Amino acid sequence: METGIIGTYYNAVTPLAAGGQPFEIYHLSKHGVHGGAASALPVATYFLNQIAFVSCGIASMVIIKKLGADYFHENVMSVYNPIVSTLGIVGVVCCLFVPLLVVLICIMPRLGIKLVKIGIKIGGKLKLIKNPEKTTLKTIKSLMNNANSLKKIIKKPFTLLISLILSFVENICVFSITFFVAKAFGFSALDSVTQMEINVFSLWGQMCCMTVLLLLAISFIPTPGNAGAADLSFYALFSSGIVGAGMSFTANTVARLFSFYSYII
């Protein structure tokens, strides 16, 4: 419990959620979990969580693209536009980059390391990366540690399966917050044609799909908890007509409290 809370807290207060794993490793090592296990556990957890998040994101993007306005409520669909769609794809690529590189290093270490060296060399020439040699060594070391962590958990398929299921459950719970807050603030959607209330389960699915798309679209914003971008994105969703007039700001504040600020508190 302590390790999970500490990791979640430092993910919330560091840009791109980069601080959680180091502090989890430190906390575990200070409490008797030494050697490879202290580093393998947080890294494997992060890896599986990213896989679950991106999988949900890709599934949501496909569902929105295929069904769109024919199935989704007009207020929910109102925040979907080419910019959000494009940023969502960029988010998928960014979130998948490290996990795919780790898998590549597991399968073909020489090729993976070569790609890292080429990428950092290009970044150095473009003046995007300072001290390319030092960065290369640090990056390769980090990726190798991630690859070793993944290999360890793959050797225990039952643990891998349970961890992956829990990662999906955790992400879906976070996506669901938007829906439940909207319901609390009066979201009771009617079909524009039949004027009949839309099934609650259907509304929940629609809101989860749109929530994960918005989260993907802002996932690469380098602020703690994607602050600013997340607030604006979800305010746009709540102000689309899914909550009562004048309640958008309050609903957005409550949703962000449950999904982000409560971790810090």
Image (spheres, rainbow, N blue to C red):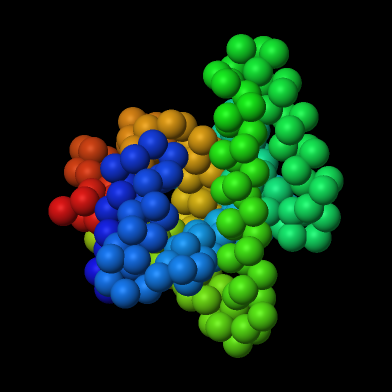
Asked if residue 55 shows in the view, the reply is: no
User: Which residue is nearer to you in this view: 250 or 3?
Assistant: 3
- Picture layout, residue 227 above or below residue 182: above
**Which residue is located at x 58 percent, y 29 percent?**
134
User: Which residue is nearer to you in this view: 88 or 225?
Assistant: 225
- Picture layout, residue 181 above or below residue 226: below
Left or right: residue 204 versus residue 261 is: right
Q: Position of residue 161 (x, y in %)?
A: 60, 81
User: Which residue is nearer to you in this view: 242 or 168?
Assistant: 168
Left or right: residue 9 versus residue 167 is: left
Image quadrant occupied by the N terminus: bottom left
**Which residue is located at x 66 percent, y 21 percent?**
123
Q: Position of residue 184 (x, y in %)?
A: 25, 60
- Picture layout, residue 173 above or below residue 217: below
Q: Farthest residue toward the bottom? A: 158
Left or right: residue 160 versus residue 7 is: right
Q: Position of residue 186 (x, y in %)?
A: 27, 57
Left or right: residue 15 versus residue 261 is: right
